[in-house]
Image (cartoon, rainbow, N blue to C red):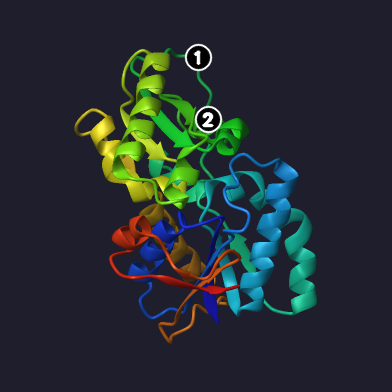
Amino acid sequence: MAIGAFDSGVGGLTVHRALVERFPAADLVYLADQANAPYGGRPGEEIVDLTRAGCEQLFDAGCDLVVLACNTASGIALRRLQQTWLPGYRRRKGRALNVLGIIVPTIEAATGLPWEHEAERRGDKVEKLDILAVFSTPATAGSRVYEIEIDKRRQDVAVFSEPCPNLARMIEEGAGADLLAAEIGGHVAALTKRIGRPPDRAILGCTHYEITADLFRVALPPGTPLIHQPQATADALARYLERHPEYDAGKGGGRRFLTTGKPGAQHGLVETFWGAPLSFEAA
């Protein structure tokens, strides 16, 4: 069978590439819902419906596991799909199927703790807070998933989210480096002003943003660590497959790239990131 990766657009390619590197023999299918991208400004119910449709397409394409390579879909839709849709869909298909997200691996990487861990609540004053910035879409920021889940596990980490309403769209459309640098610099400056100092670490909380990680490094103070979602997701999936041998990742090394939008070659920004020409098939 195969592993699927789903995103509203090209941002999930950052996760997909980490999966290709981690599982070179696996069969991997990528689906970009470019006809409906970006998701970050859409209502929650639309995000759930679009994510479910994407998962169904990947399961129909032969995938046993689907990774939501999208923070917005992971934060808004994943739990709903796992609880209310997936059990019945599994029964109808008669095989082991699952949908996983990227927020859990990211929070594990940010806290250094397993997802199951919850901090013991104490009244002691924390002497020094670790300021963690999360740059994300408005939908992810509005969900407050990073603030809520990290606070459960680490009392010494303060999370500040900065919604970036235009950045995913700009990356999706292949905006130039100068425009992207100005957009990113504005958001870093706004967050720094809001919290009173630069963050100690940062999460690029939209997989599109990883394509422009070098511009975030320039905008942030030198040496500010970035928590990389693609690597965290690949590491978590490797552990998951060890625990769940019922899921077959395939052994043919197949690679397919599908889109609900216009098929064909992608723009230069994506190809520069990917390191080679990249063409999508119609989904």
Instruction: Look at the numbered disc 2 and give the secondary structure of its residue.
Output: helix
Quarter residue 254 falls in: bottom left
How far across and how far down the image is residue 279, in percent?
43, 72
Q: Tell me what residue is drawn at x 43 percent, y 87 percent.
A: 252
Q: Is residue 80 left or right of residue 143?
A: right
Badge 2 vs badge 1, beta-carbon distance below 8 Å:
no
Q: Amino acid at mark 2?
A: Glu
Q: Which residue is mark 2?
A: 147
Residue at 58% in and 49% down: 74
**Three-letter amino acid code at the position of disc 1:** Gly
Above or below — where is 224 with respect to 69? above
Q: Quadrant of residue 126?
A: top left
Residue 123: assigned label: 1
Neighbours of disc 2 within 10 Å: few (<14), some (14-19), many (20+): some
Residue 255 lies, in percent from the top left, at 44, 78
State the image coordinates of residue 194 (x, y, percent, origin top left): 42, 15
Name which quarter of the figure residue 109 lies in. Answer: top left
Quadrant, the C terminus: bottom right
- Vertical order, 178 against 60 (above or below): above
Residue 21 visible at all:
yes
The residue positioned farthest toward the left in the image shown: 222
Compared to residue 253, the image places residue 19 above or below, namely above
The mark that comes first in sequence, 2 or 1, is 1
State which quarter of the image contains the N terminus.
bottom right
Tell me the tag on residue 192: none
- Outermost bottom residue: 252
**Marks 2 and 1, how far apart at CA:** 19 Å
Tell me if 84 is positioned left or right of 127 in this view.
Answer: right
| Camera-side mark, 2 or 1 | 2
Q: Say what secondary structure mark 1 lies in.
A: loop
Residue 260 percent across, percent down from the top left:
61, 65
